[in-house]
Image: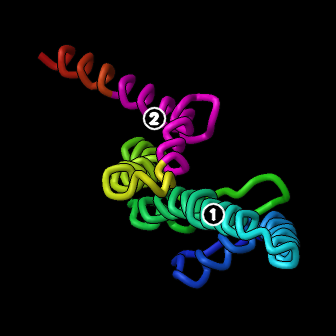
Amino acid sequence: MWTLRTTRVTAVAACRWLLLAAWPLNVLFTGLLAVTVVLGLVTEQSVIVRASLTLAAHYAIGLNGSFALHELGHLAVLARAKGVTAITLERSLWRTSISPHGRLGDRDAALAALAGPGACVGVGVILWLSAPSLQLHGWYLAHVVFLIPSFADGRTLLSAAHRGAADAARRRRERRGNR
């Protein structure tokens, strides 16, 4: 497990964290890709080489690129949130996470939850409109699923909305009681 707690997240720290997040899978994929490309070259099967390189582009730009953008979206909002005194970047075998420390308001929590999937959906729409033949947009558009309550982003958004609604109702009752 790798953990970094910092009061100021630098670009170097964020890139290091993202690279370490998926290194076992990246090493495995790169090894299998190399073997497949060599096999395609040795057997003079250009279709295998082209298919392998297309798969590599989808892996690097689609899967890893959308994952990095999603996490950086969260990080960008949390780094600027008032009341957040530090941020912990964690990577374990099965999970990569960002944990804010200090006081995170409901508005900032909702914005941070929306920022990861939102950034990906935005890029996915741009890719879909500008280069649909690359078919990379699906990787990015799929991040909208993280807003359902089964995932941390969805749960955070839901709980922030509930707390915000409860606070608004309490303020309305207080205003009526002061009349």
Q: Which mark, residue 54?
A: 1
Q: Which mark, residue 78?
A: none
Rendered image quadrant of residue 68: bottom right
| Residue 136 shows up from this direction | yes
Image spot of residue 67 (x, y percent): 59, 58
**Looking at the figure, which quarter contains the C terminus?**
top left
**Looking at the figure, which quarter contains the N terminus?**
bottom right
Q: Is residue 164 magenta?
A: yes
Amino acid type, mark 2: Ala
Label 2 with label 1: CB-CB less than 8 Å? no
| Residue 27 shows up from this direction | no
Position above or below: 69 against 174: below
Rendered image quadrant of residue 57: bottom right
Q: Is residue 44 magenta?
A: no
Chain-order first, disc 2 or disc 1: 1
> Left or right: 57 with respect to 80?
right
Tell me what residue is drawn at x 56 percent, y 65 percent.
61
Position above or below: 15 against 155: below
**Which residues lie in the magenta part?**
138-167
Residue sitting at the far bottom: 12
Amino acid type, mark 1: Thr
Mark 1 lies on a secondary structure that is: helix
> Between marks 2 and 1, how big is the CA–CA gap?
41 Å
Mark 2 lies on residue:
160
Residue sitting at the far front: 44
Tell me what residue is drawn at x 78 percent, y 68 percent.
45
Q: In terms of secondary structure, what is the magenta stretch mainly?
A: helix
> Left or right: 169 with respect to 121?
left
Rendered image quadrant of residue 151: top right
